Image: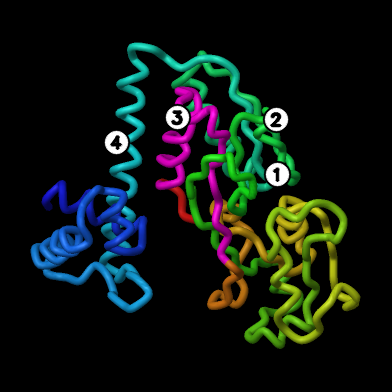
Amino acid sequence: MDWDKLRIFHAVAEAGSFTHAGENLNLSQSAVSRQISALEDSLGTPLFHRHARGLILTEQGELLYRTAHEVFAKLAMTEAALSEAKDRPKGPLKVTAPVAFGSMWLTPRMREFIDRYPDIQVSLLLDETELDLGMREADVAIRMAPPRQPDLVQRHLVTVSLHLYASRQYLQEHGTPLTTADLEKHRLVVFGEYGHAPTPSVNWLMDIGGQVGRHRPNLFTVNSVYGILRAVESGMGIGALPDYMIAESQTLDRVLPELAGPPVDTYFVYPEELRHSKRIAVFRDYLVARVAETRF
């Protein structure tokens, strides 16, 4: 597999069009298109569905993209590690993230980073409110929406998928819903109205099924996504949860598996003034590599 063509394929998959990928690669749209066509010919399979609004990866293209993304992420990490061998990054690094993502996914992965960069003193600030990076309340942020401040650098980190889950104990006692209308008969666990919601669509579960609204009798609210997880695990009812939170669960089953919530785009964000910070660069590259290993 030609390395240059694979690099161009990865850029096209990231950008979603030949034109935008060409701008990022400093190549013409036609040159990019030719390279992708040549790669498809050499592999004997189409990698993109072409349509008027852009490009969509085929099933084979998705497979190649996942592999290429992981390879390039690991190469970026290796490159950073090699450059840091001469001048290792050091100093404090304050990271803010939503409570659920920070506690369930990020925190367990921090030991390897700290072992690799012992001169960086990491502080995790887990909060649903958006700390002001411009005022240096934190150095970097993981956000579940694009930043609204114009002076922040953002990088798309991952798209989080959400589905409905319930404990096996609950399903044995109350039955498994087979249609969205069946949800009317079940107790739902949703995000409470008090507190800062991690995403605008956190309560998409309430907009499906029979009765809609907070006044239905079989409704349990808690103002924490982690709290929703613990309630669902206890057999409280059916809740909408990010897939990464239940990846290692032995007690939860997906309910109405064909039903998915609005995908949540997650971003790595930091102030423009820290663009050349080595601490932030190695942390960003580390997260990109870890994300590539996780099924979201």
Q: Distance between the Cα atoms at labels 3 and 4?
A: 14 Å
What residue did someone put label 3 on?
A: 281
Amino acid, disc 1: Val
Classify 10 Å Cα crowding around label 1: few (below 14), some (14-19), many (20 and above). Answer: some
Magenta stretch: residue 222 in it? no
Classify 10 Å Cα crowding around label 3: few (below 14), some (14-19), many (20 and above). Answer: some
Viewer-nearest of discs 2 and 4: 2
Does the residue at mark 3 contact the one at mark 4 (Cβ under 8 Å)? no
* Mark 2 or mark 1: whose residue is earlier in sequence: 1
* Mark 3 or mark 4: whose residue is earlier in sequence: 4
* Mark 3 or mark 1: whose residue is earlier in sequence: 1
* Lateral position of residue 34 relative to residue 78, left or right: left
Amino acid, disc 3: Ala
Q: Which residues are magenta?
A: 263-292
Classify 10 Å Cα crowding around label 2: few (below 14), some (14-19), many (20 and above). Answer: few
Q: Secondary structure at mark 2?
A: loop
Image coordinates for residue 88, horizontal then vertical, percent: 42, 14
What residue did someone put label 2 on?
A: 135
Amino acid, disc 4: Leu
Q: Distance between the Cα atoms at labels 2 and 1?
A: 21 Å
What residue did someone put label 4 on?
A: 75
The residue shown at (27%, 64%) is: 61
